[in-house]
Image: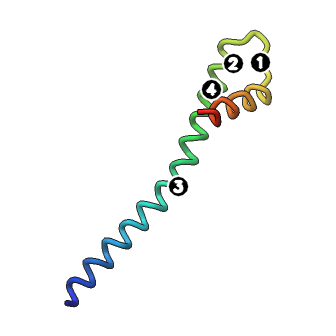
């Protein structure tokens, strides 16, 4: 009985840990995507304004 409780507790704690890690990397991925979009905007436009490029990228990413 005691062994089953330990197993169930371990599984629950593992699920919680994975759930928290997922949220940390979601923000990281969003920042990397925005940075890549800004770099692409810089390479393709003649006049580059970082603030406008960032706003444009955020709007495009939020659409998808």
Residue at x-position 58% and y-position 40%: 30
- Mark 3 vs mark 1: in front: 3
Circle 1 SS class? loop
Q: Are marks 3 and 4 in contact (CB under 8 Å)?
A: no
Which comes sooner in the sequence, label 3 or label 4? 3
Which residue does the numbered mark 2 point to in the structure image?
Answer: 42
Q: Are marks 4 and 2 in contact (CB under 8 Å)?
A: no
Crowding near the residue tagged with mark 3, few <14, some 14–19, many ≥20 C-alpha atoms within 10 Å:
few
Crowding near the residue tagged with mark 2, few <14, some 14–19, many ≥20 C-alpha atoms within 10 Å:
some
Circle 3 SS class? helix
Outermost residue toward the front in this view: 63
Which residue does the numbered mark 4 point to in the structure image?
Answer: 37
- Mark 3 vs mark 2: in front: 3
Give percent across and percent down for residue 27.
Answer: 58, 48
Which residue does the numbered mark 1 point to in the structure image?
Answer: 48
Q: Is residue 3 above or below residue 20?
A: below
Quarter-of-image position of residue 29:
top right
Q: CA distance from mark 3 to mark 4?
A: 22 Å
Left or right placement of residue 53 versus residue 28 in this view: right
Q: CA distance from mark 1 to mark 4?
A: 13 Å
Q: CA distance from mark 4 to mark 2?
A: 9 Å
Which disc number belongs to residue 23? 3
Q: CA distance from mark 1 to mark 2?
A: 6 Å
Q: Is residue 40 above or below residue 19?
A: above
Residue at x-position 31% and y-position 75%: 10
Which comes sooner in the sequence, label 1 or label 2? 2
* Quadrant housing the C terminus: top right
Which comes sooner in the sequence, label 1 or label 4? 4
- Mark 1 vs mark 4: in front: 4
Which comes sooner in the sequence, label 4 or label 2? 4
* Quadrant housing the N terminus: bottom left
Q: Is residue 51 above or below residue 41?
A: below
């Amino acid at each position: 009985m005691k062994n089953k409780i330990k197993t169930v507790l371990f599984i629950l704690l593992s699920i919680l840990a994975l759930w928290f890690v997922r949220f940390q990397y979601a923000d990281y991925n969003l920042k990397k995507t925005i940075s890549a979009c800004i770099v692409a905007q810089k390479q393709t436009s003649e006049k580059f304004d970082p603030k406008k490029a960032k706003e444009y990228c955020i709007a495009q990413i939020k659409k998808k």
